[in-house]
Image (cartoon, rainbow, N blue to C red):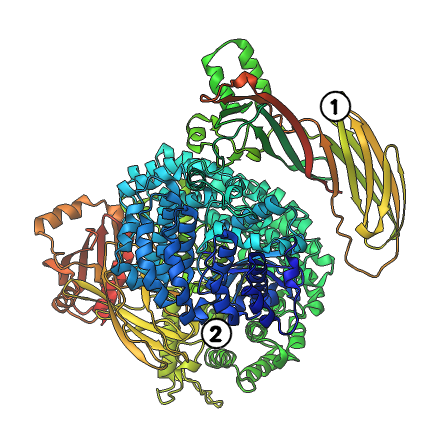
Amino acid sequence: MIGGLFIYNHKGEVLISRVYRDDIGRNAVDAFRVNVIHARQQVRSPVTNIARTSFFHVKRSNIWLAAVTKQNVNAAMVFEFLYKMCDVMTAYFGKISEENIKNNFVLIYELLDEILDFGYPQNSETGALKTFITQQGIKGQTKEEQSQITSQVTGQIGWRREGIKYRRNELFLDVLESVNLLMSPQGQVLSAHVSGRVVMKSYLSGMPECKFGMNDKIVIDKQGKGITTDETAKSSGKQSIAIDDCTFHQCVRLSKFDSERSISFIPPDGEYELMRYRTTKDIILPFRVIPLVREVGRTKLEVKVVIKSNFKPSLLAQKIEVRIPTPLNTSGVQVICMKGKAKYKASENAIVWKIKRMAGMKESQISAEIELLPTNDKKKWARPPISMNFEVPFAPSGLKVRYLKVFESKLNYSDHDVIKWVRYIGRSGIYETRC
Amino acid sequence: MTDSKYFTTTKKGEIFELKAELNSDKKEKKKEAVKKVIASMTVGKDVSALFPDVVNCMQTDNLELKKLVYLYLMNYAKSQPDMAIMAVNTFVKDCEDANPLIRALAVRTMGCIRVDKITEYLCEPLRKCLKDEDPYVRKTAAVCVAKLHDINAQLVEDQGFLDTLKDLISDSNPMVVANAVAALSEIAESHPNSNLLDLNPQTINKLLTALNECTEWGQIFILDCLANYTPRDDRESQSICERVTPRLSHANSAVVLSAVKVLMKFMEMLPKDLDYYGTLLKKLAPPLVTLLSAEPELQYVALRNINLIVQRRPEILKHEMKVFFVKYNDPIYVKLEKLDIMIRLASQANIAQVLAELKEYSTEVDVDFVRKAVRAIGRCAIKVEQSAERCVSTLLDLIQTKVNYVVQEAIVVIKDIFRKYPNKYESVIATLCENLDSLDEPEARAAMIWIVGEYAERIDNADELLESFLEGFHDESTQVQLQLLTAIVKLFLKKPTETQELVQQVLSLATQDSDNPDLRDRGYIYWRLLSTDPVAAKEVVLAEKPLISEETDLIEPTLLEELICHIGTLASVYHKPPSAFVEGSRGVQHKRISGNAVSGESVESPDNGSAAGVTEAPPAVIQSHGDLLGDLLNLDLTPPTTTGPPPPSSSGMQMGAMDLLGGGLDSLLGGDLGGNPAMGAGFGGPPAVMPASFNAPVGGGLDDLFDLGSGVGMPMGAFNPPKTVWLPAMKAKGLEISGTFVRRAGVIQMEMNLTNKAMSVMTDFAIQFNRNSFGLASAGPLQILTPLSPNQSIEAALPLSTVGPIMKMEPLNNLQVAVKNNIDVFYFSCQYPISMLFVEDGKMERQVFLATWKDIPNENESQFQIKDCHLNSDAASNKLQSSNIFTIAKRTVEGQDMLYQSMKLTNGIWVLAELRVQAGNPNYTISLKCRAPEVNQCVFQNYESVLKN
């Protein structure tokens, strides 16, 4: 199991050091600094073995978090734990920075004591932790409160406490998708997938039982079998989507999903990620990028890029940015674009073209002349792909939320009393076209 | 408000000031002071001098302060054991506190203080806490047992904590169950033979129930523990799989990977024709792909594991090539791993896409990545024949870029392509020769020299090219020197007239001016060969080379199996068994997949389930060819990459050759040149000193050498075959193993001689066999009790059973063995005489024999000739009987004796034989009939060796 956990600043100074196991000595702290943080070459693996001691590290801005062990631990678990540790810290004091860590070091030690025992991760749900790890101390608790805390920390529903009350029962569902594309210069889709997340903000009283439904092909086909009207067959054929794979927050009953494919759960209070999913079929690619690069002699490049929006004309895409890489020996660039603003950024070796808004089924174009300095470099310019950023108000995978039902038998509010909001946002992930 | 100020005090007299503050009456000031102490402790300052003052602050109602003091105690108690006792009372009192959080805190902290006197006091509170009414205290106490066990294992056993811990597996609270499982698993690891984690269907059921309810971390502990269980039958394993599969949708990647581990392992038990088996395979792919959208560090862990999974069950991900395409901004470690998997998944169906990608990658910036991409193109050519032409032209394009490292890498892979497709792409040689001057890496130079030597007859100026390398002969690396030597000898054999001078020159450079024994020895062998019999030399040096295999860098099957059992863990990230990087006894036990022996893979014909056919075939890995025999025939196939684990040691074939050579040289030198055996790095044990004036080789010696032709590979199994070297010291960090097999009174024994030729003491020996044709397995542990000191030899006899897991080997009597000691794990393979497997009751009734002989179809009959055997039929019969080959009847027809014989193998296979012996004729004819005709060849070889001995 995890033998120790260290946090360093970018200089390699230790900010937090907590050792859980006897086989990890103080010298491990220095070993990591010398061999990884101060290493002459950038380290090429997130797992490093130094003198039979294994170090797992992740970096958040310029803070290094390292877990150390001498045993054959579950490596995936260690990384998951480090990420979780970051989440917990962010939930407590915001951004992970040297300043914040120093300001909260006592709290961090307290957290580390609680969520890692002898190197075994324990309950690390912030919802539960915040009930008893506070900076105020937990003096004034009654006996009932104490046992409530412990049963929550160890219980089956470790992510929610009892007795939550809201005057107005409300919930927000955000379907956030990032659409990824790699396209060949000829317009052939090399790979495309959508990775989506359903984020829920719940402000519900009591211990509500929820059921979430979406236009999952498997579910709709199943229901379609029962009712044989043409209408349902049509709607299921058109609007359902094939989900390649999905993962759920630990509140979702996985065995129920496995057997009935129904998503039922008691949600944590506040914001959390209900599910993640991935689709690869029938993706709506919101933009198409058509590049044309021509080398005119050794000192000049002509670039023309056309972007076409491919969605309903009534919808608007926002924050559109096209990034056209330029060679390292670029000396000057002239750009002409029909819409938005374009600028050559020498420090980033790219022409950045920004458009604030663009409706569906439109087209826009940029052309640029790039002047190059003559070089002796034999190696050809690698031509990195043209990348794009945007945000659209629909889900490129085609996912639709069909329902989210809330049942709370003990309190007197019903599904109808809950105010529900649903929002779809599609963003570009890695959206690249080779040129 | 901000605590960061505590980090900045670096005044002199600080300790003194702190002391005063700690003893202050004001609570706030006290707390401030303790915070300062902790901050100093964190940055590495020694604040142990404040021990008594800090401990004085322990008795407080303020929980925050208490926690800080506890933290201090955990750090310094060990250095101040006497003063730590001062804290005991407070701990004991806290363990009785009304607040469960404080009770748990006290027991948790006490377990972290490694002071004997404190642990004594821990027992009573711990016992109470294990039975506490509050689950939070119980789950903390469960982990505390593991802590205590780490400090004092005996104490834990004596106090009966292990039983209490076992009871907690049935606890009503899922988190208590999970922690108890974690603690028990850890304790069980240090007691490999104890039955501590007594996993039976009832406990498994409890664990599976808890699995649905506990935290994500608890699920990991439980799944990791489940993976150690061996289900009783395929139904049980299916029902466990069904209950584990829902975990594949968990948001936590570690839960997913641990579930994959359980499924991969239990899947082995399922019959391959079961519908569920196919369903399961399909279910595994999507979650593995999803792992690739996790954060980069996790992607790395996932990819390292997928690499293993793809080797074991390629069918799972064969349609998912695209997800492994490299993204421009992937971290380098993710890129390199993806590339590895792309090569593994490349097939005729997707090769066009893969090649387009690889070409794209070869223009990237990162040197390592580009090199690997270029290599990958070559691998594709070797793997997918249809793509070879396109790959070669892509490589030529890359050579034209003139980027130095790209060119070198391309030449190294083109050499392999030549090996795989001889006489097909030689037209590119001219282009390669143009780049001769830019090669500065040994591997590329060696590859180029090989090409020139191999195709010397087509390269007009081959002699000039090679001569140009010869100028700086002594500055080259060994790899290049060896290759140059061989290439020039080849050239000489092809164009003897023009190159005599050149060959003289290189031979004298290699034999007289070099300190390298490998080089010198090879030089002598060539010299002797050439001076004795140039025709024979031609046959040896220009012999036809075996084709190289398609798959490369495969992990050796036994290791792969072990690593599959460690999916998700560090072992699977390093691709090394835990024993290679874990100290002490922890985790050193080798985990194995328990295959279903009944539906054994050996009986599986390749057509039922293409899946199994692909994976189970013992893969021939390029790496394993680079051995002596290969060297002599100049198959210098240096392993393409060294990222993998140590390559599997040489196969039996090479062993045999090595031994013959060793013997040949010994007799050649009349045995009067006893050298230091450890010096003979390449040749098993030839003398170290070679007379430079040696020029008239003894005929007998050379005969021995050329006996290679007929008997390569078979360490001739006489009745009691002499010991042969199985594992040379140079391959096993100084451990040399020689051995043989004997059968005495129905017991098969492997007799070994272990010699320590290293400088350090060797201990902790253990041995394990890979699955083999007849299920040979060690019947007990390897009994080497005393440590083996340098230059010491020890005899060991290992009784064998024939009830181990079965897998068909090629040749049939091949046995792959892994030997472990405190230094590393080593692999070798050897061949056992099949007579070891002839049982004592192998005598068939006459009638039965007759009926069986007729019953076995004629196509199962094989005929062999045994030459030069001067025994009469009775003597032969007696001799064979001692090997459990029984003569049932004898008939004499026209001066020819016909012996009818039978033998029975341990697995119940009968072999029937008819041996024809004619007086005066030294050549016997033998006909063998068996229902499993594969064994005939082995049996014949056995006849030969028994009769000739």
* Residue B74 image point, x, y percent: 46, 62
Residue A315 got which mark? 1
Callout 2, which amino acid? Ala
**On the image, which quarter does residue B373 sit in?**
bottom right
Residue B259 in view here? yes
Q: Are the residues flagged by discs 1 and 2 from a single subunit? A: no
Callout 1, which amino acid? Leu
Mark 2 residue element? helix
* Residue A320 image point, x, y percent: 77, 35
Q: Nearer the viewer, residue B653 or B157?
A: B157
**In this rendering, is residue B49 above or below B603?**
below
Q: How many marks?
A: 2
Q: Which residue is mark 2?
A: B537
Is mark 1 in CB contact (under 8 Å) with mark 2? no
The residue lying at 69 percent from left, 34 percent from top is A427
* Residue B458 image point, x, y percent: 63, 64
The residue lying at 76 percent from left, 48 percent from top is A383
Residue B227 in view here? no
* Residue B945 image point, x, y percent: 25, 67
- B719 relative to B256 in the view: left or right: left
Task: Tell me which chain the residue with mark 1 is part of.
Answer: A
